[in-house]
Structures are given as structure tokens and as C-alpha cells.
Amino acid sequence: MIILEKLKKTPTGREKVEVVERKGLGHPDYIADSIAENFSRKLCKLYLEKFGTILHHNVDKLQVVGGETKPKFGGGEVLKKILIFFSGRATNQVGKEKINVEEIAISSAKEFIQKNFRFLDPEEHVAYLVETKSGAGNLVDIYRRKKGIIGANDTSVGLGYYPPTKLEEVVFYLERFLNSEKFKSEFPFSGEDVKVLGWRMREKFHFTIAMSFVDKFVESVEDYKRKKKEVIAEAEEYLKGRLSNKFEVWLNTADNEKRGIDGCYLTVTGTSAEHGDDGANGRGNRVNGVIPFNRPVSLECVSGKNPVNHVGKVYNVLAYEIAKAIYEKTSVDEVYVRLVSQIGKRIDKPALIHLQLLGKVKIGEVRGLVKEIIAEWLSKEKLLQIRNQIVEGKLSLF
């Protein structure tokens, strides 16, 4: 069933107040999302290589349990390791051939850490606990039931919208800038744990940045304060190139330098996960890379779910792509898409497709085009394309 309607509201980018957040590369929730997704991709590739198909798995339950450190000006120490806890489900045996799921899980975490952190050592600073078991029989049966198009793994809803607002774009790219290779080379004291919360009040933009500082590059409280000013100046310069509006930038607003080192946001490894800050996948950015508080979004965890029939992943990606395609081929201001599934039913035939179009558009004039776009994105070819792009890491999911 397809429900297509006109939405009557102020476009999000013109509302009086808008709030957007992005959890960056070294945030514990982002770490959890990344490792869970890397785990799923590595499983997919192994299954394809050995058995010619992606076998049933959902490794979307992962936690980063904070460790313990003692930061110090000039360099502190790690007292207790971070723990990466894997659960979820994965096919671990086909016939007589066993699959070393534990090895794949641990290697997926170490690979992500080695690639993205300069001072977090996956051997010295991190411990691993893998409790990933085989899947429940009924869900595995759904996965195998039909040839070509299989049944949905869950009863759920995928949501997507397009286009992004200016604030959504700027929050996303500001974090990417602060975590870029160029920025880290110029400001090595800047840790990977960066979070950006932006809000717009009418025409003025406000940005609060949380950024861990790496203690071995900071000599004193005064040095910390100087380095904070450097980061703020760089962020402001970057924003000037992207915003014509007035804006304000704050950094590490919990600081209280009068308390000495205890009043500074210092880390040994560059992430708050090193000391007491935990993470869980699914609690961070949505498929479009931000947490948009003015928009309807799915609370489904995308990372780690299988890319074949888990609608918590596939439908959220599809909803975004359908919204984008409709926006690009019509003159609407905003598009919102909801895809509703029923467990066991064909994944290419959602129980409900709800579309809302905002702007000067006549529903009757675009109905045919919208149906064509939906049919294209729900085709076997597009579903396979999405699956392959996810497995190859070519789609950004958070």
C-alpha cells in the first residue's frame, strides 16, 4: 500500500529553532557502530568467498565498556583496558565446516582502531569479549525461505528524508574537518573523540564542540587554554567559508581550569572511552550522518545488521535513497519516506509506504513518477546494489 500526501509545515531550515548533533570518529557510540558494521562486512565477505552467499547474521548488539586512565600534563598512563563486548548472532557452521566468528569479531575491532586512532593501541589498551552465538531457528528459516527475494527479518519501520538543511550539512562537515588528517597533523593534541551540537535560532547559528585533548601534547593549564583558542579559531575560520550567517563557537564547556588538570578535558589515547565513558551501537548518528532533532527518524540500529533482509538496515537506507530520488526529480522542498515491514513478508513488498511531500506540488501530477521511483528502488537489482555497496563499505551509514 502506498500513501502519498502533501505535508503542510514550515520547511525545517526555516523553522525558528533547529537542533542537530553529530557524534564523531572517536566517540564511544561511533566506535561501537563502526566495529559492529566492520564485523558484519567481514562476515559477509567471508560467507561470499566460502559459500557464494551471505549467510544469516545480525551482530548489531555491541558495547564499548570504558576503561580507566590517569591523564597527566606531558603524558599519562592507561590503568585498565577498554572492553569491546560482542554479542548478536552469526552463522558459525555450514555442514562440517566451522567459522571462527570470534576471530572475525576481534579482527574487525583491531582493524578499525588501527586505521582510525593514532594513540589508542588495539593490543595494549583494549580487551575483547565475544559472546556471539548462532541464530534462532525461525529467523534463519525466514532468511532461507524464498529464492531471490527473501522475507523481512523484523517488523519495523525505515525512515528517510531529503534534502539536508544547512545546519545539518555544516554540523556533519565540521566534525569531519576536525577529524581530518590535515587537521590532526596541524593540531596533534586534538583527539579523535569529537562531538558537535549545533543549533540555529532564526538566522544565527551556534556550535558547541566537545573535543578530547591528548595529554602528552599539553604542558600545563595555560598551554591547554592556548590550544583551545587555536581550535576555536580554526573552527571559526572553517565556518566562515560555509556560512554567511552570524555564528558562535564554544569548545569543551565543562572545563574549569581553576581546578587544574582535573578541570581540563585531557585523555591519554584520544577517546573518552578510555575512562568511564561507555558506548553502544545504534545510539549515535542516523543513516544521513547526523542526529536531527527536528526530523522524524528511526530509532533502529543500522550498524551490524545483515544487509540482505534486515529491514532495520535495508529500509532505512532505502527510505533515504527514495526521498533523495524524489526530491531530485521533482520541484518539492522536502520529502519524507516511511517504509513499514512485516516479519517474514517479502522485503521488496513493504506493508506500507508512506510519503509526504512539502512544497508547491500537485500530488496528482507526481504520483506516477513517485510510483516509478519506488518500484525502481524496491527492485531485485537495486536491493542487490544496496547490499553490495554496504558490504564494500561504499555507503555511509552513520
Image (cartoon, rainbow, N blue to C red):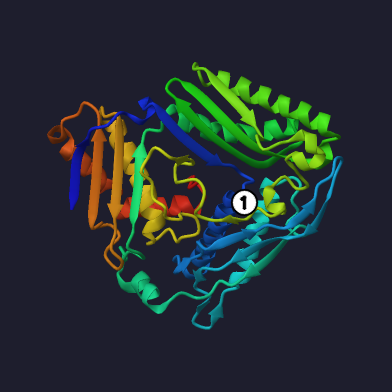
Spot occupied by residue 114 in the image (x, y as percentages of width and height): 70, 51
Decide: is 322 above or below 378: above
Decide: is 47 above or below 72: below
Give the tally of numbered discs.
Answer: 1
Which residue is tagged 1? 28
Check disc 1 and report its element: helix, strand or loop: helix
Does any portion of residue 84 appear in the rendered image?
A: yes
Q: Is residue 156 left or right of residue 246?
A: left
> Looking at the image, which residue is at 70% across and 46% down?
117
Spot occupied by residue 34 in the image (x, y as percentages of width and height): 57, 52
> Looking at the image, which residue is at 49% across and 30% down?
199
Q: Is residue 326 left or right of residue 122?
A: left
The local crowd at label 1, few if under 14, some if 14 to 19, many if 20 or more residues have their Cα within 10 Å, is: many
Decide: is 289 above or below 9: below
> Looking at the image, which residue is at 37% across and 33% down?
163
Does any portion of residue 379 appear in the rendered image?
A: no
> Looking at the image, which residue is at 43% across and 40% down?
293
Decide: is 238 above or below 112: above
Q: Is residue 60 left or right of residue 362?
A: right
Residue type beneath disc 1: Pro
Spot occupied by residue 191 in the image (x, y as percentages of width and height): 71, 40
Spot occupied by residue 72 in the image (x, y as percentages of width and height): 84, 44
Residue furthest bottom as drawn: 96
